[in-house]
Amino acid sequence: MTRIPSDIRDIIEQSIYIPMAVAIFNRDLTVIENSPFKLHRPYLTVVEEALKLAQKDLADVKRHLQKHNIKVHQVERDEAFTLYSFIYNGYEEKHNYFNPRIRNKVAELMEMYLFKLRK
């Protein structure tokens, strides 16, 4: 049984997913800049704005983790699973995440950041 409350666990999971989304947005910026598009600017603008939103959320998550003295570390990774260690209130818990689930959650986050701009 986990000793980590669900709201804290949500923040911990955000600290896993958001850095991945930021890395993908940064990589996408490079790809767009080097692509044969006639007009790069519209694509760059959309990705840059999504990146700014993700970076702001990441900063908030990091502040929250630091304030509550929560540590998150990737312990092990293979083709199917990634093992993370969470330290909260002096207790360490290890959780295995299915890599396709991580990929799907990151894709959902990216869509949220990309389409949040239009609302």
Image (cartoon, rainbow, N blue to C red):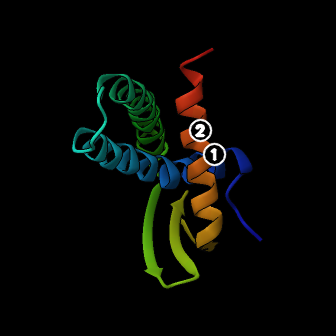
* Mark 2 residue crowding within 10 angstroms, few (<14) / some (14–19) / many (20+): few
Determine whether label 1 and label 2 are within 8 Å by CB: yes
Q: Name which quarter of the figure residue 96 lies in.
A: bottom right
Residue extending furthest toward the bottom: 78
Residue 26: image x %, image y %?
31, 44
Question: At numbered mark 2, what does the secondary structure look like: helix, strand or loop?
Answer: helix
User: What quarter of the picture does the N terminus occupy?
Assistant: bottom right
Q: Residue at x 65, y 48 (%)?
A: 10
Q: Is residue 80 above or below residue 95?
A: below
Measure the alpha-carbon separation of dots 1 and 2: 5 Å
Q: Is residue 90 visible?
A: no
Q: Amino acid at mark 1?
A: Glu
Q: Amino acid at mark 2?
A: Glu
Q: Is residue 52 visible?
A: yes
Q: Which residue is mark 1?
A: 108
Q: Residue at x 42, y 26 (%)?
A: 46
Q: Is residue 5 above or below residue 49?
A: below
User: What quarter of the picture does the C terminus occupy?
Assistant: top right
Residue 30: image x %, image y %?
25, 45
In depth, the one of 80 and 15 nearer the eye is 80
In depth, the one of 60 and 104 nearer the eye is 104
Q: Residue at x 47, y 39 (%)?
A: 61
Question: At numbered mark 1, what does the secondary structure look like: helix, strand or loop?
Answer: helix
Q: Is residue 84 above or below residue 24?
A: below
Residue 4: image x %, image y %?
67, 57
Residue 111 numbered tag: 2
* Mark 1 residue crowding within 10 angstroms, few (<14) / some (14–19) / many (20+): some
Horizontal side, residue 66 vs residue 30: left or right: right
Residue 74: image x %, image y %?
43, 70
Q: Residue at x 54, y 41 (%)?
A: 110
In depth, the one of 99 and 114 nearer the eye is 114
Residue extending furthest toward the right: 1
